[in-house]
Amino acid sequence: MFSLNRAQIIGNLTRDPDLRVIPSGQSVANFAVATNRRWTDKSGNQQEDTQFHEIVAWGKLGEIAQKLLSKGKKVYVEGRLQTRSWEAQDGAKRQRTEIVADNIIALSPKEPTSEALEKSFESEETAVKEEKAPEEFPIK
């Protein structure tokens, strides 16, 4: 019998991705994404519910996420749900449900880097220098 474990969300990062390398040598990035649901209740009042989703991105996907994403950026994440269980230092049992990403798309417009801005300024400056006034202005 078939089963399906897929999650797709679009939201904003609540913190920068944290990239680390585990003892096996594999890299993993962790970050969280907030999603909002808005509706009008029976009284006509606008309501909003915000959910926070923990994201895990392994290997190259995690490395790319760490380089391209930052807090506040809009992102699409697709992956599978995974619940981990562990015992905390105080002896309490803990659980966390995460989305293990296999596809991440940055949706916020890319901000220009200072290097890109300098190149843009230099090309504009060159274009201005290359413009020449005509030798003579025709008078009619």
Image (cartoon, helix red, strand yellow):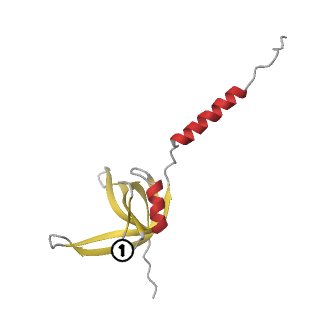
Q: Position of residue 80 (x, y in %)?
A: 42, 72
The one nearer the camera, 68 or 45, is 68
Tell me if residue 73 can be seen.
yes
Extreme residue toward the left, this view: 90
The residue shown at (43%, 58%) is: 66
Report the side of 105 relative to 98 (left or right): right
Report the side of 135 relative to 1 (left or right): right
Rendered image quadrant of residue 138: top right
- Name the image quarter holding the N terminus: bottom left
Tell me if residue 102 can be seen.
no
Report the label total. 1
Report the side of 85 relative to 70 (left or right): left
- Name the image quarter holding the C terminus: top right
Q: Position of residue 83 (x, y in %)?
A: 32, 74
Number of other residues with Cα within 10 Å of mark 1, as a class: few under 14, some 14 to 19, many 20 or more? few
Extreme residue toward the bottom, this view: 1
Give the residue pinned by disc 1: 82
The residue shown at (54%, 41%) is: 115
The one nearer the camera, 77 or 45, is 77
Picture layout, residue 44 above or below residue 82: above
Q: Position of residue 18 (x, y in %)?
A: 37, 59
The one nearer the camera, 43 or 52, is 52
The amino acid type, in three-letter code, at marker 1 is Gln
The one nearer the camera, 122 or 41, is 122
Extreme residue toward the top, this view: 140
Q: Position of residue 118 (x, y in %)?
A: 56, 37
Indicate the secondary structure of the residue bearing disc 1: strand
Rendered image quadrant of residue 119: top right
The residue shown at (50%, 54%) is: 107
